[in-house]
Amino acid sequence: MATFLYRLGRFSFRRRRLVLMLWIAVLAAVGIGAASVSASTSDAFAIPGTQSQKALDLLEKEFPQASADGATARVVFEAPDGRKLTSAAEKSEIESLVTELKSASQVASVTDPYTGGTVSKDGTIAYAQVTYSVAQADVSDAARTDLEDIAAQGEKAGLAVSMGGTALNEQTEQSATELIGIAIAAVAMVITFGSLVAAGLPLLTALFGIIAAISAITVVSSFVDLSSSTSTLALMLGLAVAIDYALFIVSRYRGELKEGHEPEEAAGRALGTAGSAVVFAGLTVVIALAGLSVIGIRMLTDIGVGAAFAVVVAVVIALTLLPAMLGFAGTRITAGKLKTRRRRAEERGEGEALGVRWARFVLRNPVKVLAVSVAGLLLLAIPALSLQLGMPTDATATPDSTQRTAYDTITDGFGPGYNGPLTVVVDARTSDDPKAAADDAVTLLDGLPDVASVSPATFNESGDVALIRAVPGSSPSGQETVDLVTDIRDRGAALRDETGAELMVTGTTALNIDISKKLSDALLPYLCVVVGLALVLLMLVFRSILVPVKAAAGFLLSVLATLGVVVAVFQWGWLADVFGVDQTGPIVSVLPIFMVGVVFGLAMDYQVFLVTRMREEYVHGADPKEAVIAGFRHGARVVTAAAVIMISVFAGFLFSDTALIKSIGLGLASAVLFDAFVVRMTIVPAVMALLGRRAWSLPGRLDRLLPNVDVEGERLRQRLEKAKDIEGSEDPQPVPSGRG
């Protein structure tokens, strides 16, 4: 691979105009495509194989008029102080508004509060249940505008009107604040390189790549419904890794120039060494992200594959466009007047860099440093023991939102369970007496302690499938409701034995419960699959067993500490004001498993970037400890800058209004902080010092079985030296630097 990348680097450098024009053509094509299509995104979950999904599919077939998978809204009315909604004036106004709701855009049905029994006992609160003929993803702006206009009419009439439900969920939009990390990234690279040209190239190529990736995702979303978070997370991860990969290659290119190589040769050597590490680091991230598709939840598949695509684009950009841009920059990339006095002294060989001094300190005290670092991460992980999972609902909306107001008002007037009623389906198609089976189901539900109310059974046209509405006594996200759903399903087995009818529970609340369970059950298998594949990949890279195992163990420490931080902030409310968290509650169910995939991929990035240079020095004859110091001498500054960049990019997403995006932003920023600075730059050298030469050992049989991918470029170096001797030490003709 190193030889191929060496040739690719020289080709892209030499034919830089052609490469640049090809990329501009690609960007123009996807950009025009994105501008000319209408993207379609969705926050809906489909979880095949679960009882709730099976029941929804049956309802869609047997009760098409019910729009079982359609979006819903609750329009909540509250009487002015001292008045009741049962008075003639208020009743007339609400009935008029309900009539308008029935004729609103995309509305399939509306439940009148006065005929549907949704007026509170004291007559001060009522709500109309609105069901749409389309799914949440397809609710139009016109439909939302109609809903808001009708609510405004109620407000003018003196009523307090609030709205909740899935129809109110706006699509996730990109925000300029989410790119605030780019400014910090630019500063970090200027400090790292001391040159505006060197700092600007990674930013330029990263922006080029991320625009291409997001445009392509937009084009795809016009043909396939994608999760509304797909492009946001692709932007988040694609931007971060694109800057890091470019940073790593540019740093190596500058190093090759300082060793006296001509620019074209330096570009080839940079890609043959650092480019190999980028390929394997990117492949590890792609494996972790694409692996999310095995969970079987479409949202995770969308965001995983979308982010993996953005990473692939970042790798391809780093291997093709970046060398071409290096051709335009030439040797000017090493010139810089922004270097600090200490940096200039280091370049003259006077003194050592901070990273080298830190590595020597860790190597002198490996046991103490290892103990303190591990203990600190485990301490931060303690809150993770209280991790509670749930899906975003109106209860977790910001306190001043209309969704949260509607939720609280319904809770005050009726009870928390009315915010998430259960839809119970009785499939009596194989029963001898469907009506008796449905009656038994109603009796069963009515006898359960945590059921507030049960509606009579409603049959389909053929009379063999019944629909029952059961309201829990507890909140939709409460453990009592989870236990109730489990209890109903367990008792359904006895009903099936007695009547031949199948009892199923569905609805938003049951769907959320099933999603959380499926994600919890899938976490360990997913972790094993991803870690297993990545261990094999790292074994190929480092020709070692202990180094990949150490990398995986460090990752586990990072992810546990990260989950602890997320729980402390978003669930317990610690430093909530600092991080802009308006509402605490359970952690979004998709977060832990998504974070496991992403954090593992990013952790392996730093592992590959830092340890590859250690391996390279060791292969070239350095003592194990000296190899560690050399790895820090060449890589610590770059890894530090890369970590600061990623932290900045991820932290920028804390400004998002979406709970999932905000929590992922904090989680990933924390994970990079822990993994880069505590695990890779502290625990790794400590463990390497304790292992010594054993760190690089590989059983002979396994060594023969594994292909040698030559990430450190040893075979490439030997081939180049041999060719140099044969040709009489003649290097390739230099390319004029800095000229197009």
Image: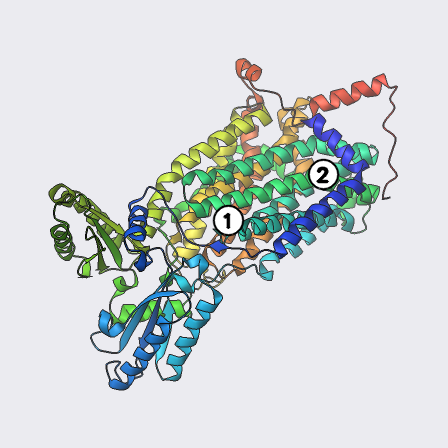
Q: Residue at x 69, y 54 (%)?
A: 187
The colour scheme used to paint the residues is rainbow
Q: Residue at x 64, y 43 (%)?
A: 244
Q: Is residue 82 left or right of residue 634?
A: left
**Considering the image in quadrants, where does the N terminus appear?**
top right
Q: Say which quarter of the image contains residue 458.
A: bottom left
Q: Which mark is residue 224?
A: 1
The foreground one among 729 and 290 is 290
Q: Is residue 175 visible?
A: yes
Q: Is residue 17 left or right of residue 278?
A: right
Would you place residue 405 above or below residue 499 in this image?
below
Q: Residues within 10 Å of mark 1 (few under 14, many from 20)?
A: few
The foreground one among 95 and 79 is 95
Would you place residue 181 above or below residue 21 in this image?
below
The foreground one among 622 and 261 is 261
**Considering the image in quadrants, where does the C terminus appear?**
top right
- Position of residue 511 measured from the top left corner of the image (x, y, whole percent): 33, 51
Whole-angstrom CA distance, mark 1 to mark 2, is 30 Å
- Position of residue 582 measured from the top left corner of the image (x, y, whole percent): 44, 64
- Position of residue 531 measured from the top left corner of the image (x, y, whole percent): 47, 33
Q: Which mark is residue 320?
A: 2
Does dot 1 land on a helix, a strand or a loop? Answer: loop
Q: Is residue 352 visible?
A: no
Q: Say which quarter of the image contains residue 257.
A: top right
Q: Earlier in the sequence, mark 1 or mark 2?
A: 1
Q: Is residue 575 left or right of residue 108?
A: right
- What type is the residue that disc 2 sits on? Thr
